[in-house]
Amino acid sequence: MSSVNRETPPHGGRAGMKKDLPERFRDYRHVWVFIELERGEVHPVSFELLGEGRKLADKLGVELAGVVLGPTGEASWQAVAQAFAYGADLAYIVESPLLVDYRNEPFTKAMTDLVNSYKPEILLLGATMRGRDLAGSVATTLLTGLTADCTQLDVDPDGSLAATRPTFGGSLLCTIYTLNCRPQMATVRPRVMPLPQREEKPVGRVIQYKLSMLEDEIVTKVLAFLPDTQSVKANLAFADVVVAGGLGLGGAENLQVVTKLARTLGAEYGCSRPLVQKGWMPAERQIGQTGKTIRPKLYIAAGISGAIQHRVGVESADLIVAVNTDPNAPIFDFAHIGITTDAIRFLPALTEAFTRRLSPHSRDKLAS
Amino acid sequence: MHIIVCIKQVPDSAQIRVHPVTNTIMRQGVPTIINPYDLFALEAALSLRDIVGGEVTVLTMGPPMAEDALRKALTYGADRAVLLTDRFFAGSDTLATSFALSQAICKIAEAFGPPDMVFTGKQTIDGDTAQVGPGIAKRLGLLQLTYVAKIASLNLDAHEITVERRAEGGMQMLKTKFPCLITMLEGTNEIRRGSLDDALRAARSQIVKWSAADAGIEDLSKCGLRGSPTVVKRVFAPASRAVKAVQIDTADKLLRDLADELIAAIFARRPALEHELAFEGA
Ligand SMILES: Cc1cc2nc3c(=O)[nH]c(=O)nc-3n(C[C@H](O)[C@H](O)[C@H](O)COP(=O)(O)OP(=O)(O)OC[C@H]3O[C@@H](n4cnc5c(N)ncnc54)[C@H](O)[C@@H]3O)c2cc1C
Ligand SMILES: Nc1ncnc2c1ncn2[C@@H]1O[C@H](COP(=O)(O)O)[C@@H](O)[C@H]1O
């Protein structure tokens, strides 16, 4: 998905024709999910993908496998156990001291060797920095297709992976197929798919695989890892209530109507992309396809038009409230409650009203 | 040192409009810009050149009008610009794009000297995959450093480079050898203004224009639509929710009353929120 004129769909005839699949790919089966393990922790996007992968595998009548590439020992086996708990039937594990920190060379080698040996038909990775770094190398090595940042995955009746993502410019989505190549690869951003139910399961099958690489063959060395200090990043994606502002707020000086409401509600605040581009808010506050995906209980959008790239980042909110002066703004197509009014004037009134309504309650709570 | 920077000309996204009836993108008259992420790559390359000497070649694959983006890059101080343009490239996905660009890089190496480094942006704002950089690296057999926040040091004799790379949950300090491919993280620097000299030079410069054949690409089946394993099967507008947003009637109301009404509507739908909010707000 990267060139000049990809929005024009080619003549339908070429698409999704599994019968044209070359002989050597016919025995590619099963759905794989890359389990991202770093510093002893599995990235939650891996669990979200297992949930999605489970659905695809069930539709195809195949198995779901988690792929753990990690250091020798405990942490990697923990990740395997977690993969089972989130729905995997089996797990591939490559344990090696070379896989302690993420580096492109050994991870690409491990993944491509595994794919060539065990032949999955679908390979899903999180669209994290690590997942994207790896996916690009693996897809190019295997000369197969890769659809980045999908927001929906499905299998169509002939068994092909239908990967849907927003397309450039305007409020459109496109569904992309990988023809004549296997595996079909896709990346999905964190929080786009729901976290599946965790179920302690008796262990599944485990296939151990040996990395055929030596440290001497790896040019890139990790000299140090400097962990981030507590940042807003995680908070926004996992917040229960989010208030966000868009270009409709007119200027940086008006952003305080958003931050004040957020503070009153104990909420996180965010923004649409143009505000980041203008330098009004830092990039980690951006919500949407190229920013954070959020799944709050309540989302209040002020002065945001609701372009598709914004919509895909907020659609899973339980309740969406939109404040916009334009009654025809696209955001009202997917918001639950709309209010056609000037956000700059309305938000302070809303902040006050919430304060009035909530403060007696909170006093009761404190007293009891 | 010879550095190649891959840049892409993209429509200025903020100004893209969708036709309200046909749901197609209205391209006419939409201004184009250099993909904003690529400017961080370009500046990183120019600064490196300014320190250690050498040349910066900018490369783009695109329609003939992409020449404008290259000329702009020359005004910032790039030394040479190459435009890879051919109708055979139309419809390229990431795999086909990285093929064409890697072939062009080989040709640049032949014509103007092998690169010590290739830079790309983190991602484009239209394709937006962040995969073309890793794709080029793999095809050329270059080591890849993605999401680089800072080039910490360079050892020219040992061909060693140390960078700070953004990773999940922290910063990795990585040391590797060049030639390598670097994708620069956004916000790491700001593109320079460009000198008057550069502007004059850019206006006079000949931009190198290569067709697929000129770039030495023999196997056209690896290019464009034919070389793209992925196809766009369907383009569609997202469904509206079954019911559109319930609008709070604003006619002749005080803001204060409107706000109370909205809050009542929120809690009517999500009663549990009232307690959670009260608790958090305390
Ligand atoms: C590849 C790509 C990725 C993208 N990724 C993202 C992303 O991750 N996140 C994102 O948000 N966008 C993203 N975008 C941009 C997206 O397409 C839109 O351009 C953007 O979301 C629009 O932001 P906005 O709604 O704030 O501004 P506008 O579209 O300009 O909307 C402003 C709205 O405010 C309303 N308004 C004006 N005045 C007032 C007022 N006083 N009170 C209330 N309302 C008012 C207007 O009616 C209008 O609806 C992406 C675009 C591309 C091409
Ligand atoms: N057509 C192109 N011409 C030159 N460089 C490109 C092209 N497409 C992508 N790139 C480079 O690859 C990076 C990642 O692009 P993408 O994978 O589309 O997000 C961009 O920031 C550019 O540096």
Image (tube, coloured by chain):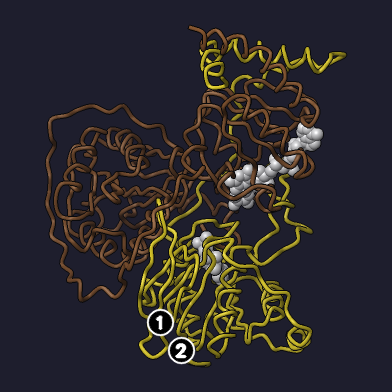
Q: Which mark is residue A254?
A: none
Q: Where is residue B171 in the image (x, y as percent from the top left)?
A: 42, 59
Residue under the point 63% across and 64% down: B35
Q: Label 2 near label 1: C-beta < 8 Å?
A: yes
Q: Is residue B175 above or below residue B208?
A: above
Quadrant of picture, ligand 2: bottom right
Please give left or right for residue A240 compared with residue B219 in the image.
right
Residue hosting label 2: B114
Look at the numbered disc 1 and give the secondary structure of its residue. Answer: loop
Q: Where is residue A132 in the image (x, y as percent from the top left)?
A: 41, 56
Distance from Cα at disc 1 to Cα at disc 2: 9 Å
Kind of residue indicated by mark 1: Pro
Report the front residue among A295 and B207: A295
- As drawn, the residue found furthest toward the front would be A367
Residue neighbourhood size for the residue with mark 1, other residues' Cα within 10 Å, grouped as few (<14), some (14–19), many (≥20)? many
Residue B140: image x %, image y %?
A: 39, 77
Rendered shade, chain B: yellow
In-image side of B254 versus A262 (left or right): right
Badge 2 crowding class, 10 Å Cα cut-off, few under 14, some 14 to 19, many 20 or more, is some
Q: Is residue A246 visible?
A: yes
Is B279 drawn above or below residue B151 in the view shown?
Answer: above
Q: Which chain carries label 2?
A: B
**Parent chain of label 1:** B
Q: Which chain corresponds to the colour brown?
A: A
Nearest to viewer (mark 1 / mark 2): 1
Residue B257 drawn above or below residue B35: above
Q: Residue flagged by tag 2: what amino acid is it?
A: Pro
Residue under label 1: B179
Circle 2: element type = loop
Report the side of A148 relative to A201 (left or right). Answer: right
Viewer-closest of A294 and B151: B151
